[in-house]
Every structure is written in structure tokens, then in C-alpha cells.
Amino acid sequence: MAQRADPLAFYERAVHDPVTEVDFLQGVFRQLRRRQPKSYREDFSGAASSACEWVRRGPQRVAIGVDIEPAVHEWGRRHCLAQLSPAARRRVKLVNADVLEVRTRTVDIISALNFSYWIFRERGQMLRYFRNVWSGLGREGIFVLDAFGGHDAFRVMRERTKHRDFTYVWDQASYHPVTGHMVCHIHFQFPDGSRLDKAFSYEWRLWTLPEIREILAEAGFSRVTVHWEGDDGKGGGNGEFAPTTEGEPDAAWIAYIVAEK
């Protein structure tokens, strides 16, 4: 099964939830700006499945997917854009470019999700990226990121999530307290005992929320709000996010960060 597996297909199933992502993006924009958003740029877009979900929601909506890897965009064309109507497909533009340098039309919302922007491990790089995002937003634009943390985030550990026909393994392989640098992998395990080890690997810096907020402010964003996930009553998250100024000292947490231009 591992030999036949398409890593990107399993990544989309295990990690990506474009419906939930777009629900949050459009919901928080409406709350802040009292109007419907129309334009969206998905940075580190991979297969651009969120960009595709965006244009599904209305004929006036347009989306841009930015990723430095041409191969992953080609996969997205075959598997994600191909599922759109011809009219919707024309409203998605895929741009192979470095997010540090890309220039696109200004949009209502830019996102950098699944912690992808943590690839920038130096403060100067992160500031440069945030400033480029600021320039890519319209006058009422917002920038949405996510982050994870809690004391489990600093541990070397593996977490397994079972799906119907595979197991998703999140592997925090190393963490260095002096630099904040960490290495993580995604593995897939299959019922026949075969494995797809290191299907994806990441060399990141584990950024904290105060650091991210401070750099966003330095980049020119007028207000930065953290949206904290609620508790499902069983020690996990319930998928609902609300603004907070404090958060909770949970072992593991995920939050959205919303930065307003």
C-alpha cells in the first residue's frame, strides 16, 4: 500500500481542511469589515485546495495560490482545480514564486496556514515576509496565520491519528532550545504493515505568540488578535475559535492569528 500511495493525496486527507479554513477566513473578515470578502491569496498554497474552496463559494470570488514548488501546483491543477467548473477554474491563479518576493494584485485576505511560515527561522526573514504580505493587502485587508504551542510542542514525541485506511503520524523529531529550531516529519502507516516514512519533513523555528505579534506590529499591521480554540470537554479542541488576550496553559494548543492592515 505504501508503494502505491500518493503522499499529497494522503496529506490533503490527514492535514488539510479547506472547508473549515475558508469558514474561518470569511467569518472573521465579515465580523471585522461588515462586508463579504471577495479576493483571497493562499501563501504556501501547496495544491491550492483552500483557494479552490474559496472560489466555489460565489461567482464574484477570485483566489491566488502562491507556492515555490512547481510540482505541487501541477498536482493541484490535476486534482483540485480539475474538480471546479470551467468558470470557477478561471478565477484561480497559481503563481510559482517565493512568498518573500511575490507581487500580486491586492486582496482582501492573505493566509499562511499549517504553520508553513515557520520555515523563516530568523527574525529578519519573518519581518520581510510580513511586510510583503502587508503590501499585498487592500486597504481593509487582513492576514490570517495559525500557530501551535504548549509544553508538548517543545518535546520530542510522536502522535498517531487513525483514519479508515491509514494512520497519520506527526513526528516531532528534534528541538533545540537555544535556537528554537525544530525538525518534524509526517509518516503514513497502512493496514498491510507497510509505511511511508518521512513523506514530508519540515525544518522550522518554534515561534511563540508574543514574538509573532510583535513582528506583525513592526511590519505595519494596526491590530493583531489571537483566536483561541475552545475545549471539547474531553481534553481536546472543539474547532471553535474566539478572540482572547490570555489563552490557557494547555499541554497542546492551536490558535489563529488575525492581523489587520
Image: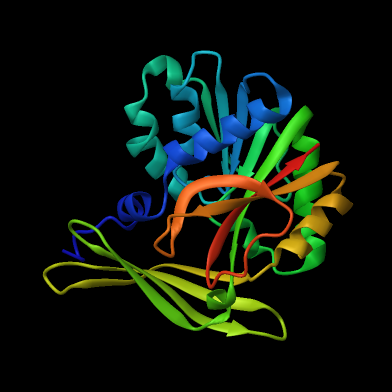
- Give the left or right position of residue 180, taking residue 184 as reference: right
The answer to which of 40 and 69 lies nearer the viewer is 40
**Vertical arrangement, residue 243 with respect to residue 35, above or below:** below
* Color scheme of the displayed model: rainbow
The answer to which of 177 and 4 lies nearer the viewer is 177
> Residue 95: horizontal and vertical position, in percent?
58, 38
Residue at 77 percent of width and 47 percent of height: 224
**Vertical arrangement, residue 235 with respect to residue 30, above or below:** below
The residue most toward the left is 192
When asked about the image quadrant of residue 220, the answer is: top right
When asked about the image quadrant of residue 53, the answer is: top left
Can residue 112 be seen? Answer: yes
- Give the left or right position of residue 188, taking residue 29 as reference: left
Residue at 56 percent of width and 28 percent of height: 63
Q: Quadrant of the C terminus?
A: top right
**Vertical arrangement, residue 3 with respect to residue 30, above or below:** below
**Vertical arrangement, residue 68 with respect to residue 4, above or below:** above
> Residue 170: horizontal and vertical position, in percent?
40, 70
Q: Quadrant of the N terminus?
A: bottom left
When asked about the image quadrant of residue 119, the answer is: bottom right
> Residue 15: horizontal and vertical position, in percent?
40, 54
Residue at 86 percent of width and 41 percent of height: 222
> Residue 192: horizontal and vertical position, in percent?
11, 70
Number of marks drawn: 0
The answer to which of 51 and 68 lies nearer the viewer is 51
